[in-house]
Image (cartoon, grey):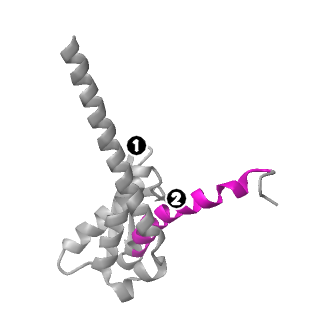
Amino acid sequence: MKKMNTTLGALSMGLLLSMSLQASDAMKMVEAASKLDVKKVCDVKSQGLDKVVATAAKYNPAAVKLGVEFKRLGITNRVYIKGLEAALKQKPVPKKVTLQYKSKGKTKSKTFPIDYAAWRSCTFSVRALQQVTEADKTWRMAVPGDGFK
């Protein structure tokens, strides 16, 4: 019984430690994203398609971990990034990307210009994390009678 309690205690401590490390990694990404200028980082013309998609792929996992991933027109940001990465592997790179997603149990698809889809995925990943820091700073303004005028 004593060994079981010791083992259970060690496992729970390990689980708590790994969860806190994952949360701290996500918070590091939030801090890094809060310092970015979305218009410059996500500009496909100046940065290039590959770099914009890489930026989206870098910041979106932190948004997913924190539960703030954007979803627009029934399509999560993960679907945008996955579709763009598949399109970039094709030679020549297509002008449009078709994204497959599930909505209400049905598989659907939507086609976007590749530049627009890249801009959208990058903006969605970075802004989701930036809004986390904005919410931490400004939530008091929404409380009636506590700073809201």
Q: Nearer the viewer, residue 78 or 147?
A: 147
Q: Is residue 141 located in the magenta-colored stretch of the structure?
A: yes
Q: Residue at x 23, y 21 (%)?
A: 6
Q: Is residue 1 left or right of residue 143?
A: left
User: Residue at 34% of width from left, 42% of height from top?
Assistant: 19
What residue type is disc 1 on? Gly
Give the quadrant of the C terminus: bottom right
Magenta stretch encompasses residue 120:
yes
Judging by the rendered image, the residue that carries numbered circle 1 is 105
Front residue of 46/29: it is 29
- Tell me the quarter of the picture where residue 28 sits: bottom left
Magenta stretch bounds: 119-144
Q: Please say if 121 is above or below 105.
A: below
| For the residues bearing labels 1 and 2, Cβ distance under 8 angstroms | no
Q: Residue at x 40, y 43 (%)?
A: 105
User: What label does residue 14 carry, if any?
Assistant: none
Main SS of the magenta segment?
helix
Q: Residue extending furthest top?
A: 1
Distance CA(mark 1)–CA(mark 2) = 30 Å
- Residue 74's place in the image compared with 127, above or below, is above
Does residue 60 sit above or below 49 in this rendering?
above
Please identify, in this view, whether the residue under mark 1 or under mark 2 is nearer the observer: 2
Residue at numbered disc 2: 132
Crowd class of label 1 (few under 14; some 14 to 19; many from 20; radius 10 Å):
few
Q: Quadrant of residue 79?
A: bottom left
Secondary structure found at label 1: loop
Mark closer to the chain start, 1 or 2: 1
Q: Does residue 41 appear anywhere in the picture?
A: yes
Note whether 101 is above or below 97 in the view shown.
above
Query: Residue at the spot x=43%, y=57% of the render?
Result: 75
Q: Is 6 on the left or on the right of 36, as rendered?
A: left
